[in-house]
Image: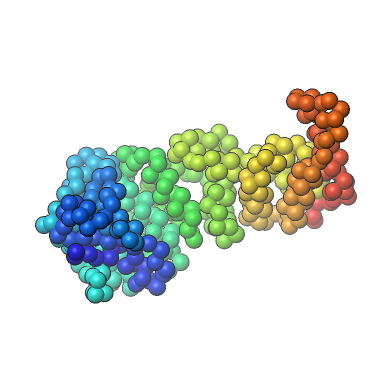
Amino acid sequence: MECYLVGGAVRDALLGCPVTERDWVVVGETPEAMLAAGFTPVGKDFPVFLHPVTHEEYALARTERKSGPGYKGFTCYAAPDVTLIQDLQRRDLTINAIAQSAEGVLIDPYGGQADLTHRVLRHVSPAFEEDPVRILRVARFSARLKKGGFTIAPDTLQLMQTMVKKGEINALVAERVWQETEKALSGDNPAVFFEILSQCQALPILWPELQTLDYQEHLATAALLTQESTIRFAVLVHRLELSATQGIIKRYKIGRVYQTVAQQLARYFQAYLTIGEIAAENIVDTLEKCDAIRKKNDFERWLIACSVLAQVLEIKANEYATWWRQAQQAIMEVDINDLIQQGLSGAALKEPIHQLRIQAVAKVLKKPSIKKEQ
């Protein structure tokens, strides 16, 4: 088979970055030939197959024609007469439109190597504006490659702005917006992702809640302190009204862990900061609201999120997470056997257990000897 390594694997290798996955284009073949060779079909909208040994993706060379609105409005044509050059032409950026033959020869018809050298993100062809997902991808690549000095070509940024004005971006489905956003939140410079969306006027459409929020510095600092995208998201939205955050979560169908961290950070961050001042009863109330016994992983994420946000806001709270962990451990070790032997059960156990937890926390933290740091 005539196979070529394409896309991110070629780009990252040329940049000297680790190659985490490899995608291939197959020229001159049919789906029947792929099946006969032992490949497994996985593509729904166009012919993509998994290699029988490596399980890497092999896609038949194809062209695309715009046939409707949005990123799904395309008619795909995959046949033996589609050339490698035609397949590369449908890609988004020149740096992603470089192929490599089995012998290691680079095929670069659209100047991708030159744009890598000059650190430029440039669209391959005018067909770029047919797919609104490319606005998100360029913003994400810009965030990822910011450290390497990459900038968006002026004509590409202008094309992105034109796409927004034409309303193409309104056809994006929520899941795809969040998919690209989540990838950006996991990168080195997530704040850049939102800055690019702002530059092309997509931010008011996709993230209107951030329009009047000075989030850039906080998100950039959080990215230096943690790799956890859930915590970065929580810091991004922490100054919004809780109802606004809940609206974002609902709109983009964001997963439970993101939702939990963001909501708990918004609700209980001030409690986190007052552990040196409040009574053991208040500490136990917060632990119980956070479900610190049954959902220990969620509670640990809340602690890390609070610690990160405190550093972002330059609040001295170095020992607070340790104190909260000590309090959590104390309530987990409360022995309720005596209460059960007294015949208590169900709802009747709730208040006695609560009181035992308060006593345990007061003892471990030696309340009220803890003082807030100056």
| Residue for point 76% across, 47% down | 329
Q: Can residue 138 be seen from the camera position used here?
A: yes
User: Colour scheme in the image?
Assistant: rainbow
Residue drawn at point x = 33 percent, y = 61 percent: 53
Residue at horizontal 49 percent and vertical 44 percent from the top: 210
Q: Residue at x 34, y 61 (%)?
A: 54
Is residue 57 left or right of 348 when viewed as pictured?
Answer: left
Q: Residue furthest left?
A: 81
Query: Picture coordinates of residue 80 (x, y %)?
Result: 13, 56
Horizontally, is 135 left or right of 99 in the view? right
Image coords of residue 221 (percent x, y): 57, 58
**Total number of numbered labels?**
0
Describe residue 115's horizontal placement relative to residue 269 as left or right.
Answer: left
Does residue 60 lie above or below 327 as drawn?
A: below
Q: Quadrant of residue 52?
A: bottom left
Residue 224: x and y in percent read 57, 61
- Position of the C terminus, as image quadrant, is bottom right
Left or right: residue 335 versus residue 287 is: right
**Residue 110 seen by the camera:** no
**Nearest the camera: 344 or 305?**
344
